[in-house]
Image: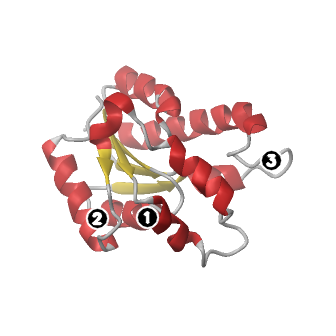
Amino acid sequence: MAGDVVILSGPPGAGKTTVGGLVAAESAGASVHMATDFFYRSIRSGYVAPFLPESQRQNEVVIEAIAASATAFARGGYRVVVDGIVGPWFLDPFRKAAERDGLALSYVVLRPALDVALDRVRGRGDDELSDPEAISGLHSAFTSLGDLEDHVLDPGELTPEQTTREVRSALETGRFRLI
């Protein structure tokens, strides 16, 4: 039996990694929590910070690798929760793979207010994205999602556990389903 892929996206400081881990851990069957940061950190030479314009080709390659890995697990029956900055501009590889393999694909955007996101990232270590200018730019990339605006959940005043319940409830109803 095929699993499904849930993309949990949004700007830095949205709570993606925390909520992604909880959603995967609380899934009824077999599950995988796939943090996209791992894929970027795997690049040992030639790495370009993914929010810079010159990173476009690198980001396309990384997204292809993430989509291939996620759908491989899903074909094996796992619910795969992909957490990372996966904007609508990077959904095509996931859509194509899900359609090809007959998998369900959901897209959830956690989008707190900018001040909340900035507060959350202030205490991050050097390995994490914490530059306010970069975070503001990434946050603005998620402010107008057009047809995908109904895939947004504001976790600003919610605890991670409350956000997880909201995400799980919406997934059960198909609210965030793309395919």
Task: Give the residue type that dot 2 points to.
Answer: Thr
Q: Quadrant of the N terminus?
A: top left
Front-most of 121 and 35? Answer: 121
Residue under the point 31% across and 74% down = 159
**Image quadrant where residue 128 sits:** bottom right
Residue under the point 42% across and 37% down = 144
Q: Earlier in the sequence, mark 2 or mark 3?
A: 3
**Image quadrant where residue 127 sits:** bottom right
What colouring style does the render use? secondary structure
Circle 3 Cα neighbour tier, 10 Å, few/some/many (<14 / 14–19 / ≥20): few
Relative to 99, residue 77 above or below: below
Circle 1 Cα neighbour tier, 10 Å, few/some/many (<14 / 14–19 / ≥20): many
Q: Earlier in the sequence, mark 1 or mark 2?
A: 1
**Image quadrant where residue 98 sits:** top left
Residue depth check, mark 2 versus mark 3: number of the one nearer the observer: 2
Q: Are marks 1 and 2 in contact (CB under 8 Å)?
A: yes
The residue sitting at the bottom extreme is 123
Residue depth check, mark 3 versus mark 1: number of the one nearer the observer: 1
Q: Are marks 3 and 1 in contact (CB under 8 Å)?
A: no
Mark 1 = which residue? Answer: 15
Residue 47 lies left or right of residue 90; in this view the side is right
Gap between marks 1 and 2, in whole Å?
Answer: 9 Å
Mark 3 = which residue? Answer: 47
Residue under the point 52% across and 35% down = 68
Residue 28 pos. (x, y %): 21, 58
SS under mark 1? loop
Relative to 36, residue 76 above or below: above
Labels in figure, total: 3
SS under mark 3? loop
Gap between marks 3 and 1, in whole Å?
Answer: 25 Å
Mark 2 = which residue? Answer: 163
Circle 2 Cα neighbour tier, 10 Å, few/some/many (<14 / 14–19 / ≥20): many
